[in-house]
Amino acid sequence: MTRSDSNGDDPVDFEVPDGATVFDQDVDPVETDEWLDALESVIAREGPLRAHYLVERLIRRARRRGVYLPYSANTAYINSIPESQERKSPGDHALEHRIRSIIRWNAMAMVVQANRESSELGGHIASFASAATLYDVGFNHFWRAPSESHGGDLLYIQGHSAPGIYARAYLEGRLSESQLHRFR
């Protein structure tokens, strides 16, 4: 098993096939710093593609020489887009946060009201609450209605998230208050 320290750089304690254990005790920190400095230099002078090429060549060479490198299908999350190249998120963040809060509140009120009428109706407000931001970003910036140039996006909304979707439709004026009262 492989674990990493907090910054994901150094392996900490994993098993190798013969039962030996490798620890994070660097026996030659000066050499390690030289290798890391060289990598930083390549990235700065020649770019990330060249650095990737060199690291892949080192891995292949190490494997050919019999060095055990444990395979891991899971890697630490690293944003693949450098911060300097990230696009600014569209929209008014403060306004969208406020609208999202109102939608969450209305969804919760719908579930509470339905439960007052009959406890058998239940309610799953946590399903929507946990995904509210994802729905909000999708509705505001990605999903599109039908138009002359686009057939429109077809969404499947998981049933337990329906209170939040109905609350949004009410806020947008697509559902009336009387329709909302018939929820469930």
Image: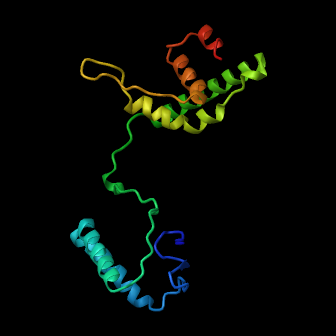
Front residue of 12/15: it is 15
Drawn side of residue 168 relative to residue 64, left or right: right
Residue under the image location 54 percent in, 24 percent down = 165
Instruction: Determine which quarter of the picture holds residue 115.
Output: top right
**Residue 41: x percent and y percent?**
28, 76
Front residue of 13/78: it is 13
Residue under the image location 40 percent in, 34 percent down = 91
**Residue 157: x percent and y percent?**
51, 28
Residue under the image location 62 percent in, 8 percent down = 178
Instruction: Determine which quarter of the picture holds residue 116.
Output: top right
State how many labels appear: 0
Drawn side of residue 150 relative to residue 156, left or right: left
Colour convention: rainbow
Drawn side of residue 144 relative to residue 9, left or right: left
Front residue of 159/39: it is 159
**Residue 101: x percent and y percent?**
59, 31
Front residue of 171/155: it is 155
**The furthest residue to the left:** 46
Vertical position of residue 118 compared to residue 161: above or below = above
**Residue 151: x percent and y percent?**
30, 22
Vertical position of residue 179 compared to residue 123: above or below = above
Residue under the image location 49 percent in, 13 percent down = 174
Quarter placement of the N terminus: bottom right
Quarter placement of the C terminus: top right
**The furthest residue to the front:** 18
